Amino acid sequence: LPTRSQVDPGSLPAYACQRHTPLNHHNLCFTEALETLAEAAGFEGSQGRLISFRRAASVLRALPGPITNVSQLRGLPCFGDHSSRIVQELLEHGISSEVERVKQSERYQTMKLFTQIFGVGVKTADKWYREGLRTLEDLQGQTRKLNRQQEAGIRHFEDLSSSVWRHEADAIQRVVEEAVWQVLPGASVTLTGGFRRGKLQGHDVDFLITHPVEGQEAGLIPKVMGLLESQGLVLYQHTQSNHYQDFKDLEHKVSQSTAIDAYERCFSILWLPKSPTSFHPEAGEGPKEPSRDGKAVRVDLVVAPISQFAFALLGWTGSQHFERELRRFSRAEKQMLLNSHGLYHPEKKESLPAASEEDIFTHLGLEYIAPEQRNA
Ligand code: ATP
Ligand code: MN
Ligand code: MN
């Protein structure tokens, strides 16, 4: 019988969308190091290096056992010299000098802090860094630099940088459902993102909304947000109406290979009141803060017509790396274009309909991977 530490690299497919990647795996110390280097590469605008490190980390997450010897890396897909060297260093010394140097650098720490702010991407963080800004206090002293979203991100920084727990996501779902059903009876609210993949905590809560009658869903979000606002639950919101009109046809729509889709959506910060009966995992770990009777939570709402729901569900469940790999596989191996709206065959000039995520995997000739196994 093979032991769990025995790894057969020959059996591991090259694309993350061909592999089962559970949430909990056996190589955390290696994946953390590689993800740090991926993140740092992203901060320097090196998209290629970011993806290389992320692919290597993703391969380790899919392994059935821990890496205990560098020889086990031989034959693994997506494992280049640099990633191998990091793993070797960790195996030999328990620590990687390169990773430690990155983590301790002012550049990495500042970029990590700034990009953690809601509404701040790498470009903005880099600009602020080059202007000499280093802390949240530095930013608060320069409020003219901030847009409305970033200002809200800083105002609620403490709440937003602490994890959202699964029971909090469920509580938010009940609040959102109540509002959605009041506006449009029969609509459905589906939890997507990391929580659908089985994560117990996340940085936000993602919902996908649809209605069994095509077209009924249009214009839903402004009404829902209006209702939540009247209940005093909206701390920040930015709603975008759908921009399907920008896409003349599905071919154009799916050939926009960016991750950004055209759905009606809302990026928000909602207020989750602390219910007296709810379970608080943090209770008992320190003195209670009597002034806090609730928490600010980042919530994303997306509305899809039922005909595109399966594609939207697949696209918004993630992980981000799993999605990127699905699109890459479709393009390179199947000559098809996949995004959150559909799957298109440019040569045959046909789009393939799907009523479920399973249908999409079938169209692509892929084994179905359940959401809990998409933690690539
Ligand atoms: P976390 O726990 O950190 O929230 P997550 O996997 O839920 O993890 P999100 O950033 O919430 O991460 O993204 C969830 C999914 O939604 C990802 O698969 C991502 O590709 C997709 N997504 C995020 N933003 C957009 C967007 N603007 N357009 C299309 N898809 C998006
Ligand atoms: Mn999320
Ligand atoms: Mn999100």
Image: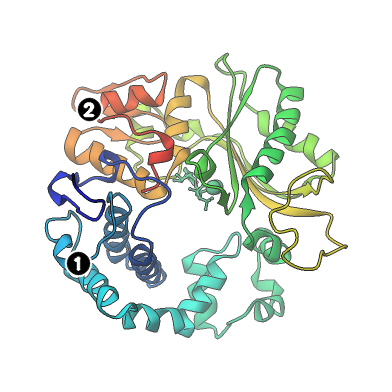
Res. 164 visible in picture: yes
Residue 176 badge: none
Mark 2 and mark 1: Cα distance apart in space: 34 Å
Tell me, for residue 365, which label it has, or none.
Answer: 2
Residue, far front: 1
Is the residue at mark 2 in contact range of ligand 1, meaning its CB lies under 8 Å from it? no
* Mark 1 surroundings: few (<14), some (14-19) or many (≥20) residues within 10 A: few
214 to 260, vertically: above or below: above
> Of tags 2 and 1, which is closer to the observer?
1
The earlier-in-sequence mark between 2 and 1 is 1
Q: Are marks 2 and 1 in contact (CB under 8 Å)?
A: no
Which residue is under mark 1? 69
Residue ranking furthest to the right: 290
At 17% from the left and 37% from the top, the residue drawn is 333
Give x and y (percent) for residue 226. 78, 36
Placement of the N terminus among the 4 image quadrants: top left
Q: Amino acid at mark 2?
A: Gly
Q: Is residue 215 above or below residue 149?
A: above
Which one is nearer the viewer's eye here, 191 or 137?
191
Q: Vertically, is 133 above or below 280?
A: below
Residue 175, x across and y down, in percent: 74, 35
